[in-house]
Amino acid sequence: MAGSHSGSDVRVAAVILALAIGIGPAATQDISLEYRVKAAYLYNFVKFVQWPQDARGGPVNICIAGRNPFGTVLAETINEESIDGRMLTSRVILEPEPDCHVLFVPEGASGAYLRAARGTSTLTVGETDNFLDEGGVITFVKEGRNVRFAISTEAADQAKLRVSSRLLQLAINTRGKR
């Protein structure tokens, strides 16, 4: 995944923006622009992260912990999409599950989800100020009206995930050694 992409960081940013803006109006009427952008980011994160060999079979499962702030936007964003021949799926989980490749932990969700993901090859993504401090890999950061993200390379290494240098360059902050 991470090694099979070409192009510049500007192109990556343009793709993320185009996905965020290009989602149809029927799906997004009740969903804020913030969550439409976050759905596009989640889709793109999968493209720029490489999982260990033992976690590469079957579909890429994007799980949403507890409540679903995306409505149908995330499901529509990844509908019929695949990365390296693996279909993308999304679902809301009401308790931690072992087969999530990406786990989005929205604000207010129990810390049990993040604790259960420790020691697994799960890309954990959150939206709270202390998410990286709690061991998460990526956290969304609001800068005015913009949604950006920060990455903990240390947490990614612990999860045995390889994050593309292109994604690291787009992050507003990275923690850990590289």
Image (cartoon, grey):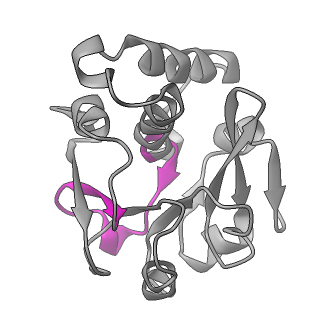
Measured as percent of width and height from the top left, residue 50 is found at 47, 55
Measured as percent of width and height from the top left, residue 133 is found at 75, 75
Tell me where the magenta segment starts and ends, as one range.
46-65
Q: Is residue 33 above or below residue 63?
A: above
Q: Quadrant of residue 75?
A: top left
Q: Is residue 100 above or below residue 61?
A: below
Report the quarter where the N terminus lies.
top left
Q: Is residue 7 magenta?
A: no
Measured as percent of width and height from the top left, residue 137 is found at 61, 65
All told, the count of numbered labels is 0
Q: Is residue 41 above or below residue 125?
A: above
Identified at 54% across, 32% down, the residue is 34
Residue extending furthest front? 30
State the residue in front, 31 or 165.
31
Name the side, left or right, on which 119 lies relative to 67. right
Name the side, left or right, on which 6 lies relative to 120. right
Name the side, left or right, on which 15 lies relative to 133. left
Identified at 66% across, 68% down, the residue is 131
Identified at 34% across, 60% down, the residue is 67
Report the quarter where the C terminus lies.
bottom right
State the residue in front, 158 or 39.
39
Identified at 70% across, 26% down, the residue is 145
Q: Quadrant of residue 92?
A: bottom left
